[in-house]
Amino acid sequence: MIKLSLTVNGRRVTADIDPRTLLVDFLRSNLRLTGTHVGCDTSQCGACTVHLNGQSVKSCAVLAASCEGAEVVTIEGLATGTTLHPMQEAFREHHALQCGFCTPGMIMAGVDIVNRHGAKLDEATIRKELEGNLCRCTGYHNIVRAIETGAAAMAGAKVAAE
Amino acid sequence: MTDQGIGASVKRKEDLRFITGKGQYVDDINRHGQAYAVFARSPVAHATINNIDVSEALASPGVLGVYTGADLAADKIGGLICGWMIHSKDGSPMKAGAHPALAQGKVRYVGDHVAVVIAETLDQAKDAAGLIQVDYGELPAVVDVASAQAAGKAQIHDEAPGNTVYQWHLGDKDAVDAAFSKAAHVTKLDIVNNRLVPNAMEPRAAIGDYDAGQDQFTLYTTSQNPHVARLVLSAFIGIAPENKLRVIAPDVGGGFGSKIFIYAEETVCIWAAKKVGRPVKWVAERTEAFLADAHGRDHVTTAELAMDVSGKILALRASTKANLGAYLSTFASSVPTYLYAPLLSGQYDIPAIYCEVDGVYTTTTPVDAYRGAGRPEATFVVERLIEVAARETGRDPAEFRRMNFIKSFPHQTPVIMAYDAGNYGASLDKALEMADYKGLAARKAESAKKGKLRGLGFSAYIEACGIAPSRAVGSLGAGVGLWESAEIRVNPVGTIEVLTGSHSHGQGHETTFAQVIASKLGVPIEQVSIVHGDTDKVQMGMGTYGSRSGAVGASAIVKASEKIIAKGKRVAAACMEVPEDSVDFENGEFLGRGTNKKMTFGEVALQAYVAHKFDPEVIEPGLKEGSFYDPKNFTFPSGVHIAEIEIDPETGHTRIDRWTAVDDFGILINPMIVEGQVHGGIAQGVGQAMLEHTVYDENGQLITGSFMDYTMPRADDLPSYNVAMTTTPCPSNPLGVKGCGEAGAIAAPPALINAITDALGHEDIAMPATPQAVWRAAQKSARKMAAE
Ligand code: FES
Ligand code: FES
């Protein structure tokens, strides 16, 4: 067992963990943050996507022990109180989810795509950037629309805040 | 209310929990004191089990129990069942081998369940599973469906000589032979419909829980049909009587058929929970999903189409070998028979059809229903034959289809189905226009200038949904009735719970069913809760598959709401002191005809419960009604999809340039959700046609057993889709709906292969048309052009 301290969704957490624990298991089992999902065993599906120090990572491919002192944001930490993040709103608005299983990872990836590319996203960029996230339900059409809209809304929110 | 009722693209009520990470899938549920199950699976495709030594595993830290098939047998736990009896041509019943939840004496595919370890932690269970010693006497694998019945092949089940489960047929062979003998042209194709791995993004999972005080079992499971699971686990497998077994299917992350079936894992978890006296949880790893979730498709077919000199189709015949895998999964026998051959008339007036199907055992993962289930296989046969026939006879593929379309309804096909309504020409016209078919020649020339090959392919599909009239399916061998149930509970303040036997695992029933209530009862959808997926709450149900939730499930809700209105009128009449037959119900209000008296729905609900104003001898208090709805026919959604692609012959890369889908699903409850279903279906169809390749080696090892080896469709493999509708209401149910869940997956593969072969100028390419396969085929095109 080793001691781990980090910030998850703005809250400091400290735990004793087995050094082999994956970040996704730490989030799901220790913290009961079950919005982060596990869809594969080869780091291919992106259902487990979270933000680690502001960047999107597959939490099934990260050892929790390597996150000492890190800032982690999961799908549960994206909204501000009851105000949804613009990307969450956009997913609902565009019917970008069906069974919802890939959705937390898709939304976290979508936010990250906008963070890296800015609001002016074309369809080809979004599709290319989604290569690490699988969805079996939607055929991606509406996910692309949602990320386009979410990007514009994030830019608007940023302008408003400045 | 129209902004929320039938026909409105209402945003989904269920979304909030999913976009905030608050969904509750089985793996998100943890029971106090839960232990973990890990299955020891066969590493070989076919072997006798000479001995299993579990002693080391039992002694491993944290282990609570290690069980094998012998333990299940000792507890008189029955095998898994196949619920549809098929009879061969000679009248004999299908020859099914036993399907124990844990192997007894033999393993028959890689991934077959040999033993289970239950331990305190998942890691301990995994470690112990690795310590189980099995002495296998290896037998030859039987992988290839085309040769599995040949003499000298290893025998997989003693009960099924020649590995043949059934030799079934449908149609009038003599009439078909006669038609072929006088045909002016015959088109013949050899077709492989490739095996697919369903890969819902949520892996299957189960938690078995046993309450000794109440002698009560609870199973949490990733199921599309929890009541069917309870029925099978109770009546056939013998876990517990139905009143002592509760099955809960909470949020389920996609199914596509693969979560219809009752599998070994949940059977073992619920049984073992009592054995070890602890809740037992199992969650599939993706590798296990590849090995042990029932696969789809896997047909080898020879098909022929006969035409007269004018191009009128005279007859169709098909001979299919269907790979059923190593055991018969829950509905496996029905998929390549009654869900397949009755669709071989497509949208066409074909006077004679004959189809024979051999159901074949192989030492591979069991094969069962996967999105479309039989109907995609049939549509692929029909739409490839039609396209190639048009090409061979120099006819425009659109006009050749149009001339052979069924144009008057009802239409009785020669293969069981009585199509009730349709307008196939309307979908075709709209699709041709949207796809700019007229401009194709110019676009082809433009592509040719860049050294690219452009092609366009049609798919005019028919589907049979809303399975189905119970008496009809019963006469065809189904072991169950296929009605659906609904119960509407109106609360004293006018809020409503609707209990449905349908199950939503992405379809959005919490929204669409509430929209039906909004339309029928005038109650805003915010005041309507849809309850599903729990056998303790919902009395009965047949679940969701085969696009049946709208046509059957929502129709049951309509029937129940009609009873609510009838009862409400009686209560209102008593309260308003007007004759019962003078009460009208409009826009959520009960009106005394010819008076100015009226009561809101909520007021009537309250009066029904306080029961102060009517005689309980005449009117029972309360406002709750139920219905079991059994449809009078299948529904027949149809449509035309047009794929247009461009091939780079240098690399074999196929780019989907545009996708046009014009579907006729009858009345739409929520067009936004329907379009989403179409998108997802097309993506799965494109996956089958271009990407998804399930490969076994000759030893029966699944070579494509992970997302690294099996190509799932990703966002940049796919285009945006142009989706539109035509509307011919279905006359066979009260809503006029037809079902939309499978259409895309049915329509897409032939559209794409027709487009690719159009570009290539020859028909020699199989699914999946991967870049490598397309590159090879393009080389052949080049040689062919050079020779011409
Ligand atoms: S679970 Fe992490 S990528 Fe699939
Ligand atoms: S919504 Fe089901 S996997 Fe994406």
Image (cartoon, grey):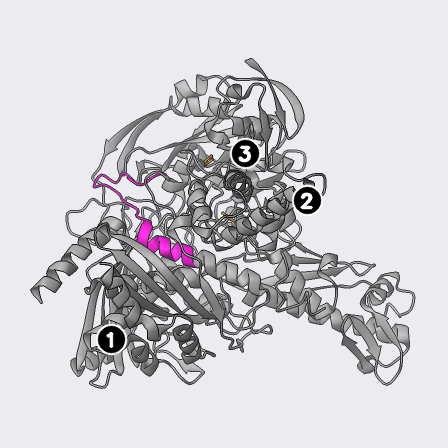
Mark 2–mark 3 contact, CB under 8 Å? no
Classed neighbour count for the residue bearing mark 3: other residues with Cα under 10 Å, few (<14), some (14–19), many (≥20)? many
Expressed as whole percent of the image width and height from the top left, the position of residue B394 reads 21, 78
Label 2, secondary structure: give it: helix
Q: Nearer the viewer, residue B783 or B179?
A: B783
Classed neighbour count for the residue bearing mark 2: other residues with Cα under 10 Å, few (<14), some (14–19), many (≥20)? few
* Quarter of the N terminus of chain A within the rendering: top right
Q: Is residue B624 left or right of residue A140?
A: right
Q: Are marks 2 and 1 in one subunit?
A: no
Pointer 1 chain: B
Label 3 sits on what residue type?
Answer: Val
Q: State the residue position of label 1.
A: B390
Expressed as whole percent of the image width and height from the top left, the position of residue B781 reads 16, 60
Label 1, secondary structure: give it: helix
Q: State the residue position of label 2.
A: A160
Expressed as whole percent of the image width and height from the top left, the position of residue B673 reads 56, 60
Q: Is residue A151 left or right of residue B493?
A: left
In reply to whether residue B276 is colored magenta, the answer given is: no
Circle nearer the viewer, 3 or 1: 3
Label 1 sits on what residue type?
Answer: Ala
Q: Nearer the viewer, residue B279 or A72?
A: A72
Label 2 sits on what residue type?
Answer: Ala
Q: State the residue position of label 3.
A: A50
| Prevailing secondary structure class for the magenta stretch in the rendered image | loop
CA–CA distance between discs 2 and 3? 26 Å
